[in-house]
Amino acid sequence: MIDERKEIQDKDIYILAIESSCDETAAAVVKNGREVLSNVISSQIALHTLYGGVVPEIASRKHIEKINQVIEEALREAGVTLQDITAIAVTYGPGLVGALLVGVSAAKAISFATGIPLIGIHHIEGHISANYIENKELEPPFICLVASGGHSHLVLVKDYGEYDIVGRTRDDAAGEAFDKVARAIGLGYPGGPKIDKLSKEGNPDAIHFPRAVVTENEYDFSFSGLKSAVLNYLNGCQMKGEPVCEADVAASFQKAVIDVLVEHSIHAVKEFGFDKFAIAGGVASNSSLRNALEQECCKNHISFYHPSPIFCTDNAAMIGVAGYYEYLKGARSGYDLNAVPNLKLGSREGVTGYECIKG
Ligand code: KG4
Ligand code: ZN
């Protein structure tokens, strides 16, 4: 078995990856797990901005219009053809069902027409795997904070493809809180990058917003109370006819989110006895969060890993990296692969042929 795996690893492995779980239509080619040959992202953000958030039906329709073009561009940019591709990795959950179905259908069609193996990938596994692209020395185990528009998880990455969730949000995800607060202060969608930018002009200590403590699990998060506190503050100002300093609100809100994310993360890394910590997901591109984590990790002698911002927000390169490790482990999906909007991390649902070639 070990020989079989070694033989696979001795050959160059090219993964064609497809991601369409939300509002980015993306395709990439990744060589040998950590070398990104192309990373094409067609963003729908401008379109959804008109409506203040992602409209699922519009997202699906746009994915259909773009998917073939994006895949062709990814192959062209990488300088490869389908004949060079070893396996096709595609996000099949979690996400918007109609959006996921477009990527899954495209991947199945190419796989069926060419005979190239198909592998369904969990979107969050992709986000975590983005850390392997620029940190060639990073290997599991480590703790990873995944903070995106749909998730806020503290994950124990035990091995490639092996995860334990040690903390999760009880209500809103961190990115969701950013988006909702941004809308309330009139910044529009997507909120994260706009709050990140405006916060630089504000005082993070101007307004004290609450930091929720979840008593049942010290690693869990809760952001809905913070969001309500910001809305109450804005309403209060309006009723009293007081002016609102949006930059101070943005900076104070952002500080409240960051304080909790940093505290829980460092606590988990120490309690689980690790010296490696990584971040992932759209919120991981937040400049103040990255600075705060850098400082705290340095103070606590923890090695801090983070993807470049382009690999934090949704992209297909991260799916290609995850696909490579799943391929090495023998994971294969059948043509009955379906979109699973609420897919659990670590679930083998959708991986019908798990030909285990572990040593
Ligand atoms: O990972 P992602 O691209 O999509 C999901 O899987 O959800 O994350 C998108 C989320 C959005 O909520 C967006 O506002 C947030 O990430 N985000 C940020 C920043 N850039 C994106 N949040 C805070 N600061 C940022 N710079
Ligand atoms: Zn994502």
Image: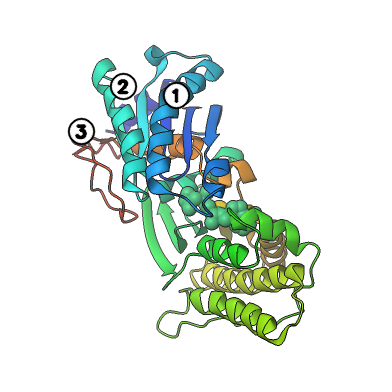
Q: Is residue 139 left or right of residue 100?
A: right
Location of residue 164 in the rendering, given as x and y in whole percent from the top left corner:
37, 61
Label 2 packing within 10 angstroms: few (<14), some (14-19), many (20+):
some
Location of residue 133 in the rendering, given as x and y in whole percent from the top left corner:
56, 38
What amino acid is labelled 3 in the image? Gly
Q: Residue at x 59, y 82 (%)?
A: 232
Q: Residue at x 47, y 50 (%)?
A: 54
- The residue where tag 1 is placed is 71
- Mark positioned earlier in the residue sequence (2 or 3): 2
Mark 3 vs mark 1, foreground winner is 1
- Mark number displayed over residue 334: 3
- Mark number displayed over residue 6: none
Q: Is residue 355 left or right of residue 125?
A: left
Q: Is residue 284 visible?
A: no
**Dots 2 and 1: beta carbons under 8 Å?**
yes
Location of residue 217 in the rendering, given as x and y in whole percent from the top left corner:
42, 79
What amino acid is labelled 1 in the image? Ile
User: Quick one: SS at disc 2?
Assistant: helix
Location of residue 350 in the rendering, given as x and y in whole percent from the top left corner:
23, 43
